[in-house]
Image (spheres, grey):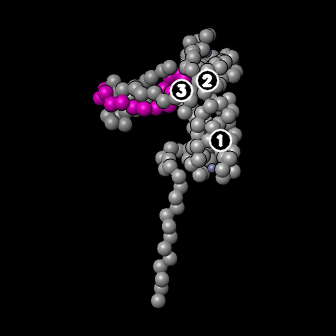
Amino acid sequence: MSSAISQKPKQGGPSMSDEESSAGVESRISAPDLSCPKCNHLLPNGLGIITCLMCKSEVKVEHQGTRKKWREEKIGCPSCSKVLICGVDKRPANLQCASCQTHFVLKPNRPKIEVSCPSCDRKLRMNKRPGEREITCPACEAEFKISF
Ligand SMILES: [Zn+2]
Ligand SMILES: [Zn+2]
Ligand SMILES: [Zn+2]
C-alpha cells in the first residue's frame, strides 16, 4: 500500500516573470530623464553623480522632488506582502520588513519605453538605455536602430 504525499504548491507571493525575481523589488519611481550637457545623449536614470555612458563626463543630478517621492514610496514586502514605506531617499535602498524581518533591496527604476516597429507597426516595450541599439522586431524580424 502506498499513500501519496500531497504537497501543497508553494505560495510565492506575486508571480514575477521578470528575469530578476530574487529578493529585490524595483522602485516604481524614476528620476527625471536628463540629457548629457556635453553630448546630448540620454543620461542613465538616477540621482547623484551620473556618468554619461557615451562621453564619460560626470554630471551632477539632483532633484528634491524625486528624493521626497523615493522616501515616501510604498513597497510591498517580497516575502510577506506587507506594505512598507521606504523611508530612504536613494536607490538602491537596503530595506528590512518590519513585519517578517526579511531583508531586500529596492532597486532603481528602469525606465521603459515603447517604440513601434517601422515595418509592421507592432509596439515593442524595452528598457530605456542611452546610446544606439539595434532591435530585431519579434513579429516581423525587421531590424532597425533606435537611439536616445
Ligand atoms: Zn555625454
Ligand atoms: Zn515582510
Ligand atoms: Zn515588425
Task: Look at discs 3 and 2 and give the one toward the viewer.
Answer: 2
Of the residues under marks 2 and 1, which one precedes in the sequence?
2
User: How many residues crowd around disc 2 within 10 Å: few (fewer than 14), some, or many (20 or more)?
Assistant: some
Residue 79 vertical placement versus 120 (above, below)? below
Return the residue nearer the eye: 110 or 81: 81
Three-letter residue code for mark 1: Val
Label drawn at residue 66: 2
Ligand 1 has an atom within 8 Å of the beta carbon of the residue at disc 2: no
Task: Kindly indicate whether the residue at mark 1 contacts the one at mark 2 (C-beta within 8 angstroms).
Answer: no
SS under mark 2: helix
Residue at 50% across, 22% down:
132
Task: Write down the quadrant of residue 47 in the picture.
Answer: top right
Residue 136 vertical placement versus 146 (above, below)? below
- The residue at which mark 1 appears reads as 105
Of the residues under marks 1 and 3, which one precedes in the sequence?
1
Three-letter residue code for mark 3: Arg
Task: Write down the quadrant of residue 138 in the picture.
Answer: top left
Circle count: 3
- The residue at which mark 3 appears reads as 129
Three-letter residue code for mark 2: Thr
Write down the region rendered in magenta: 119-133
Residue at 68% across, 47% down:
98
- Label 3 and label 2: CA atoms lie apart by 20 Å
Task: Kindly indicate whether the residue at mark 3 contacts the one at mark 1 (C-beta within 8 angstroms).
Answer: no
Task: Look at discs 1 and 3 and give the one toward the viewer.
Answer: 1
Q: Position of residue 136 (x, y in %)?
A: 40, 32
